[in-house]
């Protein structure tokens, strides 16, 4: 048994199983055929999802990873198969998503000779991966796989590429199970100096107007409970970044909503009034800060993060607390006295009311006129009770979904944040159906759906129960909004001539309906959620709607447009 | 508002794996910091590579850049230093025309005064070697160049050792090896 010789491809299968992998998203081709041949004998344990384009494989792996917390796996061939995954790899890097991309490669003896479908994936992906490695010998497979998964899931997670030469797939080697649990040159979790915890507790405990910023780091650390105890002990209002949204339930009294460009007016205003800003597992992206030069200048800033390279990268902080925020939050909470910031908390109501009157109510409960994206999202939230995983594509559909969905569970919001990758939604939603059991709703625009529309074939084949809500405004709406605000309404190539989406769905055997009237929306949503399996609900929404409020690029964070009649051009 | 820039020297240790140099220089490119000199060589420790890189930047940039380099999986450690914290040295070769050398006594005088060593002479050319601080090495070049006798000039990147009394890398590696053994 010990000395049994196996092919590299078979060793890969066993190594994946040893990592607990049960689903792969992939697409075969010449340079990965030995692996696909080995997979044939493992197909009962390793469920292979045949995507329709390798970009879909990468995003599906991301969707799987984001809802499950486990690394998603892609299997693709060399050359074009490998390069097709690059958008997904870059997306995963930006959003700290653990995926392992295994690509075929020409035989080691052909490397560098411009052999058929040779492409230097390792070099191409080096800047957009946490780690990229070429496997050239069958004997190296087990260790490389274990190392890849260890790197992808630990510390600040991220994508890993394993480029697997064809000779290494077919050559024989003994299978020696490997379990990498530490790497000398890699410190996944920086040590937390005890004095940093004490200083943080003193600074935060002494705050009169504390504000907590919740990033995806909380989710990645599985620190949702710790975060909740922390904000409750501190009695501080909290805001979430786009990717931090489901880390604190929407209904929690201290959750004031989303931060940033299209975030809550009250949060963005209060950012400029707080005296201590506590950032947890977030990276002060420009979509959060607006003009960094004026961002929360008055506040002392405390930053909890697992990645020391994030400290002082975009915004100077007064105190950095390195470490896993599950541990650091817990430790700081223990040092904090019970806070009482009632007056400060209640001071958020004024701006929240203003936003409700001017933006939220008119958009979510319009009496007349065309259907609005906001009311569709609100309607879905009402029907699901915030119980579904919400996946989005990119654009106005994404921002409305983020603003008006309700979240009750961790890891229930999946969206492309740092990259803003159109075409992410559909395949990510497919991946999400494999990563957890609950319902999955996708909000997608008429532009983004077409970017990866071929994955309807994957849904058909897998009967993936994705509830697709197509918010059709016949525009590349997000770009059109910017054209309206910043380019004198010159709608340069943003009107979208659309196909008949119901017919497209029908061709894939996916039930579909279109809603054009307010009166039939709730019923249609309920019907979609009751249906077994996939469903496409197209909603004809207002063509020139705008996501509001809006902090225009480069403006101070509290300088937000409440109506699109304000001229963003000044 | 322009930030104040200074000359910094980064000392980086990595595992001896393919592609690390690429990853390191890529961080400089992304952060728009020009590398002034770069030296890569095996360190005194088996399997560990050492890079010495000098560049001009402001301290905020160099701090983030160093952390972004250290974050690369195969990089063991990256630190940045100012001039007074390290001892630096550069090596250079100057290939000069022998007829000029013989015709103008000032040339051999400059070589002697500035610490150059003539290591090869033939009727066509002579080779001068010099080691020293980067500005000294450059100084000799400028003198020879003014005489119009330089056929080729090459200088190594700066190499540097820290003036610290503790051997931090060795201590750090010991600690990391221990951590790996115990799986913590
Ligand atoms: C791959 C890609 N290309 C281009 C963009 C730029 N972009 C951002 S939003 C957007 C419009 C999206 O239109 P649609 O999918 O219809 O969504 P809507 O905004 O109308 O809801 C575009 C083109 C992008 N984010 N990603
Ligand atoms: Mg659209």
Image (spheres, coloured by chain):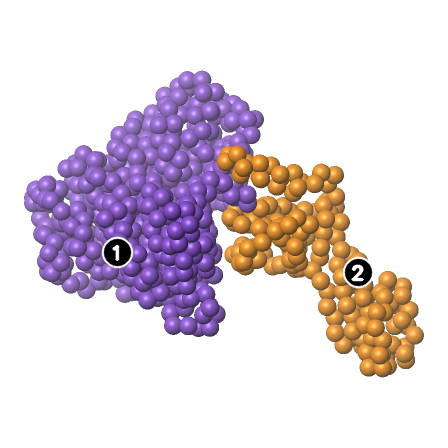
Chain colours: A purple, B orange
Instruction: Indicate the position of residue A406 as horizontal and vertical percent values.
Output: 24, 36
Q: What secondary structure is marked by label 2?
A: strand
Label number found at residue A372: none
Which mark's residue is nearer the viewer, 1 or 2?
A: 1
On screen, residue A504 versus residue B49, left or right, reads left
Q: Residue at x 17, y 55 (%)?
A: A461
Q: Is residue A498 visible?
A: yes
User: Residue A217's spot in the image, x, y percent?
Assistant: 40, 38
Q: Provide the residue designation for mark 1.
A: A40
Q: CA distance from mark 1 to mark 2?
A: 64 Å
A77 vs A396, nearest the viewer = A77
* A122 is higher (above) or lower (below) than A210: below
Left or right of A4? Residue B11 is right
Q: Dot 2 corresponds to which residue?
A: B131
Tell me the residue at 10%/56% (across/down).
Answer: A509
Q: Is residue A256 visible?
A: no
Q: In what element is the residue under mark 1? A: helix
Position of residue A291 measured from the top left corner of the image (x, y, whole percent): 45, 46
Rate crowding at label 1 as few (under 14), some (14 to 19) or many (20 or more) other CA atoms within 10 Å.
few
Residue at the image position 11 percent from the left and 60 percent from the top: A507
Tell whether A267 sits left or right of B45: left
Residue A508 position, x and y percent, is 13, 58
């Amino acid at each position: 048994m010990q000395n049994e010789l196996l092919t590299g491809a078979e060793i890969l299968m066993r190594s994946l199983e040893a990592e607990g992998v049960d689903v792969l998203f992939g697409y075969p081709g010449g340079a990965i055929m030995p692996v696909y041949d080995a997979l044939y004998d493992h197909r009962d344990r390793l469920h292979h999802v045949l995507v329709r384009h390798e970009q879909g494989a990468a995003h599906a792996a991301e969707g799987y990873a984001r809802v499950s917390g486990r690394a998603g796996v892609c299997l693709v061939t060399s050359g074009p198969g490998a390069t097709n995954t690059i958008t997904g790899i870059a997306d995963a890097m930006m959003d700290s998503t653990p995926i392992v991309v295994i690509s075929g490669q020409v035989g080691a003896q052909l490397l560098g000779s411009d052999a058929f479908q040779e492409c230097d994936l390792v070099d191409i992906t080096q800047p957009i991966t946490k780690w990229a490695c070429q496997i050239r010998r069958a004997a190296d497979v087990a260790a490389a796989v274990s190392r890849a998964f260890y790197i992808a899931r630990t510390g600040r997670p991220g994508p890993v590429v394993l480029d697997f030469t064809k000779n290494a797939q077919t050559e024989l080697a003994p299978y020696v199970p490997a379990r990498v649990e530490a790497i000398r040159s890699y410190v996944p979790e920086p040590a937390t100096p005890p004095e940093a915890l004490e200083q943080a507790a003193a600074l935060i405990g002494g705050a009169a107007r504390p504000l907590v910023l919740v990033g995806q780091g909380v989710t990645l650390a599985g620190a949702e409970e710790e975060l909740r105890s922390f904000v409750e002990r501190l009695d501080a209002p909290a805001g979430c970044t786009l990717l931090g949204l489901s880390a604190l339930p929407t209904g929690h009294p201290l959750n004031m909503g989303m931060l940033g460009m299209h975030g809550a007016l009250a949060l963005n205003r209060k950012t400029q009034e707080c005296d201590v800003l506590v950032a947890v597992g977030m990276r002060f992206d420009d979509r959060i800060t607006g003009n960094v030069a004026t961002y929360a200048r008055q506040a002392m800033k405390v930053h909890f993060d697992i990645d020391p390279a994030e400290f002082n990268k975009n915004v100077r902080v007064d105190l950095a607390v390195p470490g896993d925020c599950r541990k650091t939050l817990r430790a700081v909470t223990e040092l904090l006295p019970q806070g009482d910031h009632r007056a400060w908390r209640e001071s958020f109501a004024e701006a929240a009311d203003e936003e409700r009157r001017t933006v939220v109510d008119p958009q979510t409960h319009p009496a007349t006129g065309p259907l609005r994206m906001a009311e569709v999202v609100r309607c879905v939230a009402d029907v699901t009770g915030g119980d579904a995983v919400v996946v989005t594509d990119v654009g106005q559909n994404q921002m409305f979904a983020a603003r008006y969905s309700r979240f009750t569970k961790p890891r229930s919001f999946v969206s492309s944040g740092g990259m803003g990758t159109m075409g992410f939604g559909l395949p990510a939603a497919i991946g999400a159906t494999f990563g957890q059991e609950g319902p999955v709703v996708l909000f997608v625009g008429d532009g983004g759906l077409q970017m990866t529309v071929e994955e309807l074939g994957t849904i058909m084949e897998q009967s993936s129960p994705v509830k697709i809500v197509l918010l059709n405004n016949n525009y590349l709406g997000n770009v059109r909004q910017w054209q309206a605000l910043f380019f004198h309404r010159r709608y340069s190539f943003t009107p979208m001539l659309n196909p008949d989406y119901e017919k497209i769905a029908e061709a894939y055997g996916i039930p579909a309906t279109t809603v054009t009237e307010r009166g039939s929306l709730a019923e249609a949503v309920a019907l979609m959620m009751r249906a077994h399996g996939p469903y496409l609900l197209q909603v004809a929404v207002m063509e020139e709607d705008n996501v509001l409020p809006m902090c225009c690029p480069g403006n101070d964070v509290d300088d937000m447009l409440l109506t699109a009649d304000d001229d963003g051009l000044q | 508002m322009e930030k104040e820039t200074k000359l910094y020297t980064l000392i980086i240790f990595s595992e001896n794996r393919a592609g690390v140099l690429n990853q390191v220089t890529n961080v400089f490119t992304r952060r728009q910091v020009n590398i002034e000199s770069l030296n890569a060589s095996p360190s005194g420790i088996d399997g560990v590579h050492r890079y010495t890189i000098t560049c001009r930047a402001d301290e905020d940039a160099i701090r983030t850049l160093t952390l972004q380099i250290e974050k690369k999986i195969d990089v063991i450690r990256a630190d940045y230093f100012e001039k007074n914290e390290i001892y630096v040295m550069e090596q250079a070769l100057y290939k000069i025309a022998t007829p000029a050398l013989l015709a103008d006594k000032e040339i051999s005088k400059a070589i002697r005064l500035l610490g150059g060593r003539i290591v090869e002479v033939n009727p066509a050319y002579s080779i001068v070697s010099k080691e020293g601080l980067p500005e000294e090495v450059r100084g000799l070049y400028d003198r020879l160049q003014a005489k119009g006798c330089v056929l080729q000039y090459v200088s190594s990147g700066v190499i540097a050792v820290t003036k610290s009394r503790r051997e931090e890398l060795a201590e750090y590696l010991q600690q990391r090896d221990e951590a790996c053994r115990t799986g913590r």
